Image (cartoon, rainbow, N blue to C red):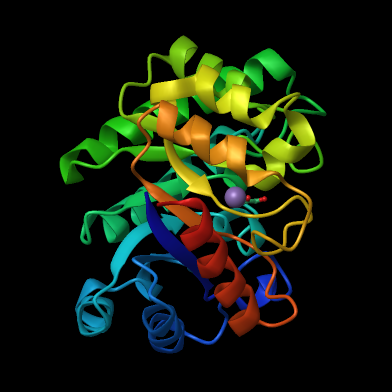
Amino acid sequence: MKSCVTISLVEEARGGPFVFWDGVEDGCKRAAELGFDAIEIFPPAADAVNVDDIKPILDRHNLTLAAVGTGAGMVKHGLSLTNADGSHRAKAAEFVRSIIDCAGAFGASAIIGSMQGRHGGDVDKPTALQWLGDAVAELGSYAQQYNVPLIYEPLNRYETNLCNTMADGVQLLTNAGASNVVLLADLFHMNIEEANVAAAITDSGKHIGHVHFVDSNRQAAGAGHTDFGPIITALKSIGYDGYLCAEAFPLPDSQRAAQLTIDSFRKLVT
Ligand code: LER
Ligand code: MN
């Protein structure tokens, strides 16, 4: 398993659960000094992840771009893949495609989390799940040209009422016949929703393609009460060799959150 840390470039999200906030150069420099393998970027839009600008920074610091989030489509532009209006949904899918393209230029995956939206009003749950499954399957096929999967993230109940558990996620992908889509196991969301986090990882097995490595209180791993031992054992048992990416609040500050994350990673992953 490889270590990874988040860099947010979205001013509107300041205060949110991302470790570094002061640009790609600053985040990469700090990540490299601490010995991280990779970064994940949360950009306001695709043009903030330009390969000509960012690849040299990654190379200089010997880092990989693991993934790029699409959440700004929701946070900044108000877009959702399950909006009642078809032309709105098309715009949301176009935003995700633009992130798949910019991430694909690095051989990295895009992540769909907040952009899944929620059901309610004129849209009932089966309809929203159908739209979401269709969109995720189609966007997964679109990502195929870059030889990377699309990453889909179940979220806790306060952020979506569509898929809250890993089992919900497996069902969504299976029903939609989505062949190039993997699940993101975010240990914060799972701490809220799963009866047993380790068992949920074992049960969803080969579907898991990315992990948000974070403690029960959404602080850096080691700052809350999650028992990471059985979780790492479960990830090993399914043969997971992807990233453990710190998507955590910058508490008490970015540097100390990153330091605690890498210390916990080294203690847990041998
Ligand atoms: C949102 O809660 C989250 O976990 C992000 O990774 C999704 O964009
Ligand atoms: Mn997450």
Q: Is residue 123 above or below residue 80?
A: above
22 sits to left or right of 50: right
Closest to the observer: 200 or 59?
200
Q: Position of residue 236 (x, y in %)?
A: 42, 34
166 sits to left or right of 195: left
130 sits to left or right of 119: left
Q: Is residue 123 above or below residue 4?
A: above
Closest to the observer: 145 or 128?
145
Q: Is residue 29 above or below residue 147?
A: below
Closest to the observer: 19 or 141?
19
> Is residue 44 visible to us here?
no
Name the residue: 75% across, 80% down: 252
Determine which quarter of the picture holds residue 181. top left
Q: Position of residue 80 (x, y in %)?
A: 61, 43
Query: How many numbered circles are shown?
Result: 0
Determine which quarter of the picture holds residue 26. bottom left
Name the residue: 22% across, 36% down: 144
> Is residue 112 visible to us here?
yes
Q: Is residue 210 above or below residue 107?
A: above
Q: Position of residue 222 (x, y in %)?
A: 68, 60
58 sits to left or right of 248: left
Name the residue: 37% across, 39% down: 150
Name the residue: 22% across, 76% down: 55
Q: Position of residue 264 (x, y in %)?
A: 57, 61
